[in-house]
Image (cartoon, rainbow, N blue to C red):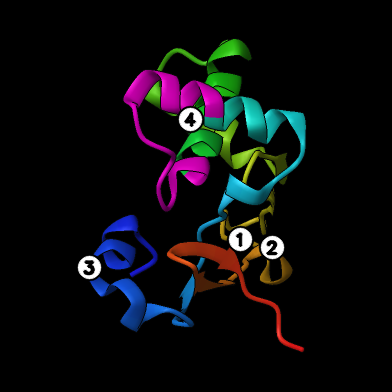
């Protein structure tokens, strides 16, 4: 639901809608890395990054780190990925359990509200 299509279709009747998404929205981020990512993404694809784009970028960088560490086979990549207990990404800081699952406190659900036809971080109060 947290998509530009929803905003376009719902129009004024959707104003105030709150959507929950585990995806990070970098559109209001002020750090240089996020702004550069948005600019590069828009230059390459002609549209702003959508839901889960930043998380996909983070996963890709985890693979890049495995390759840079010398992993060339599937098994080596797998071992490299299993050895990561923390990864500071663009969307989140990911902390992993020894089982490979996200640590309980590392998972995030973000709330967004349709304000004037744009998804904005929702903050109560």
Q: Is residue 29 above or below residue 35?
A: below
Q: Disc 4 designates what residue?
A: 60
Mark 1 or mark 4, which has the lower sequence index? 4
Q: Residue at x 58, y 58 (%)?
A: 99
Q: Which residues are magenta?
A: 39-55
Q: Disc 3 designates what residue?
A: 9
Label 2 crowd bin: few (<14), some (14–19), many (20+), radius 10 Å: few
Q: Residue at x 50, y 37 (%)?
A: 59
Tell me whether the residue at label 1 lies in contact with that at label 2, contact meaning CB atoms closer than 8 angstroms: yes
Q: Residue at x 58, y 47 (%)?
A: 27
Mark 1 or mark 3, which has the lower sequence index? 3
Determine the CA span between mark 4 and mark 2: 18 Å
What is the total number of numbered labels drawn onto the structure image?
A: 4
Q: Secondary structure at mark 1?
A: loop
At which x and y percent is residue 82?
A: 58, 41
Determine the CA span between mark 1 and mark 2: 6 Å
Q: Disc 2 designates what residue?
A: 106
At which x and y percent is residue 111?
A: 57, 74
Of 72 and 88, the residue lying toward us:
88
Q: Disc 1 designates what residue?
A: 102
Of 64 and 36, the residue lying toward us:
36
């Amino acid at each position: 639901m947290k998509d530009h299509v929803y905003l376009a279709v719902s129009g004024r009747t959707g104003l105030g809608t709150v959507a929950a998404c585990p995806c990070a929205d970098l559109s209001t981020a002020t750090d240089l890395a996020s702004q550069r990512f948005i600019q590069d993404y828009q230059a390459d694809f002609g549209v702003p990054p959508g839901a889960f784009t930043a998380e996909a970028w983070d996963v890709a960088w985890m693979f890049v780190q495995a390759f840079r560490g010398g992993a060339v086979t599937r098994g080596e990549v797998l071992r490299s990925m299993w050895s990561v207990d923390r990864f500071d990404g663009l969307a989140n800081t990911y902390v992993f359990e020894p089982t490979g699952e996200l640590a309980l406190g590392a998972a995030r659900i973000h709330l967004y509200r349709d304000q004037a036809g744009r998804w904005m971080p929702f903050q109560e109060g």
